Image: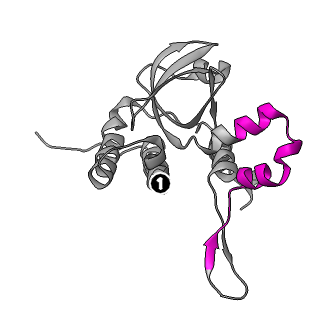
Amino acid sequence: LDLDDDPEQESIYEIMMPLFLSWLVYSFRPLVEQARSKRRRRRETAAALMLQQAGKRLDPLQARYAQVALASPLSFWIVEQVTPGKALELRSVFTGERARVIDILLSQGVRRGEVVFSRVVALDGFAVVDGCAGIRITPDYLQWILDLKDEIQTREGSVTLAIADRYLQRSLRLYFEICADLITPRMPIMQNT
């Protein structure tokens, strides 16, 4: 794919890059074949491997951040309050968990009631977003997300962030469905009255 030929495609890649990088480092577990048994198994994530191999050489804050980020899944968060240029209050759509997030850029670009798809990492009394997707979800799509929450709750009995993490692929698929609906204009329905 030659992005130089399609500026619109390039901007979509730029918008999605933070989400992709967070997923790649903290969530992606590649399948590898074991030579002798010809069986496939999931490897650790890049962040987990880094902690195993270089954990003692990392700054303690970096190591703790990676550990907390590994345990913090990508998820849907409702923006409850915004202090532009400083912070925002988020609430997990799946669990109701709340977080006050320090983020200068994100707090300038979202409005109360919108939904963001992100990893919220809380450490030492502060929370930050890691890998916030660039397309904000308007409130009229909230029901789509609540339907997924109901589906998870029916299967699992309850929804915690750890349980929601097991449904990451389904959450990503839903996020991309919503994005496609948001960025693809709908044709108006014409009717004779």
Overall secondary structure of the magenta section:
helix
Q: Is 71 on the left or on the right of 139, as rendered?
A: right
Tell me, yes or no, whether the highlighted magenta stretch contains residue 53: yes
State the image quarter where residue 66 is shown: top right
Please say if 99 is above or below 191. above
Q: Which structural element holds mark 1?
A: helix
Q: Residues within 10 Å of mark 1 (few under 14, many from 20)?
A: few
Residue at 42% x, 41% y: name it. 160
State the image quarter where residue 15 is shown: top right
Q: Taking the image as drawn, is residue 163 in sight?
A: yes
Please say if 23 is above or below 66. below
Residue assigned mark 1: 166
Identity, as a three-letter code, of the amino acid under mark 1? Arg
| Magenta extent | 40-66
Residue at 66% x, 45% y: name it. 22
Please say if 63 is above or below 153. above
Quarter holding the C terminus? top left
